[in-house]
Amino acid sequence: MNPPGRPKGEYRRAEPEGTPMNGLSPRLSVFIAEDEAPARARLVETLRRVAPHAEVAGWAASVLDAADWLAHHPPPDLLLLDIQLADGLSLELFADAGIASPVVFTTAHDEFVLQAFRAQAIDYLLKPIQDDALAAAIAKHARLARHFAGSDALLGLRARLAAPQRLRVVGRKGAHFVALPIEQVAYFVTADKLGFAVATDGTRCLLDTPLAELEAGLDPARFFRVNRQYLVSAPAIVRFGPAGKGRLALALAPRADGEVVVSQERAAAFREWLAQ
């Protein structure tokens, strides 16, 4: 049923798909956003084959109706979202950070990969969705759920999120001091024992605060310490790729002066962070 006072849209409780796929109590609730009925039906059938323990709790064909459904129902365990919907990109659903459910994006296009992983994606599947690909995504979701359920890592992350976070940093440009809002910081870098904040427009401010102290007061969902020199924000990462021996090379915007490399030891944590 649609919420009172708004026009009827393609916003559904997902019947008959809403029944548990194995005839037992539902163990994995799934919400689907897909604007093409045949593609939606194929996705549901694939889900039935590879995850009989799943329940399709609801579906929508547009960003507006997906937002409406998610606002008026308990959070599902997993979102299966086509990126390009009838009225825009499903990535818009994550603009205000109000959705906590992990997501698997299903799409015919690959140009949104980086944006998808910034929007807490755990996987990115290209259409037509193959059984083994969806099964692997469901298995990955289960592994992550087991890993973080009551773990010290999750408790530590929650503690950091609950701690007071910096709203701005104060630095020097020439003879003057400036207050730079955190959302305007692309990354922090140390060079020749000096620390700098690099703004999204490329300007630099000299800092007196060490990176370790800065990191403790920053949102861990936005900033990641990739190595001893760089503390980067997710929006500053243009792309990344292999750099040999399990390391990752990052391309940042604004462009960094030198090579920015994530060590082999930090590579897995970096990928998990970017996929939040």
Image (spheres, grey):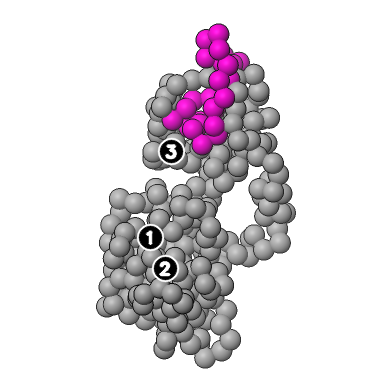
Residue 193 percent location from the top left of the image? 60, 15
Whole-angstrom CA distance, mark 3 to mark 1, is 21 Å
Amino acid type shown at disc 3? Ile
Q: Secondary structure at mark 3?
A: strand
Whole-angstrom CA distance, mark 2 to mark 1, is 8 Å
Looking at the image, tell me whether mark 3 or mark 1 is earlier in sequence order: 1
Q: Secondary structure at mark 1?
A: helix
Q: Main secondary structure of the magenta part?
A: strand
Extreme-front residue of the structure: 5
Residue depicted at 64% across the width and 19% down the height = 208
Which residue, given by chain and number where applicable, does mark 1 sit on? 90
Toward which corner of the image does residue 167 lie, by quadrant?
Answer: top right
Q: Crowding near pointer 3: few (<14 within 10 Å), some, many (20+)?
A: some
Looking at the image, tell me whether mark 2 or mark 1 is earlier in sequence order: 2
Q: Is residue 85 above or below residue 56?
A: above
Q: Is residue 248 above or below residue 176?
A: below
10 or 141, nearer to the observer? 10
Amino acid type shown at disc 1? Ser
Whole-angstrom CA distance, mark 3 to mark 2, is 28 Å
Residue depicted at 45% across the width and 21% down the height = 203
Amino acid type shown at disc 2? Ala
Residue 225 percent location from the top left of the image? 58, 35
Query: Which quadrant: the N terminus?
Result: bottom left
Span of residues in magenta: 171-200
Lateral position of residue 61 relative to residue 50, left or right: left
| Tags 2 and 1 touching, CB below 8 Å | yes
Residue 145 percent location from the top left of the image? 60, 64
Which of the labelled discs sits on residue 237, or is there none?
Answer: 3
Which of the labelled discs sits on residue 122, or is there none?
Answer: none
Residue 108 percent location from the top left of the image? 27, 61
6 or 249, nearer to the observer? 6
Which of the labelled discs sits on residue 66, or is there none?
Answer: 2
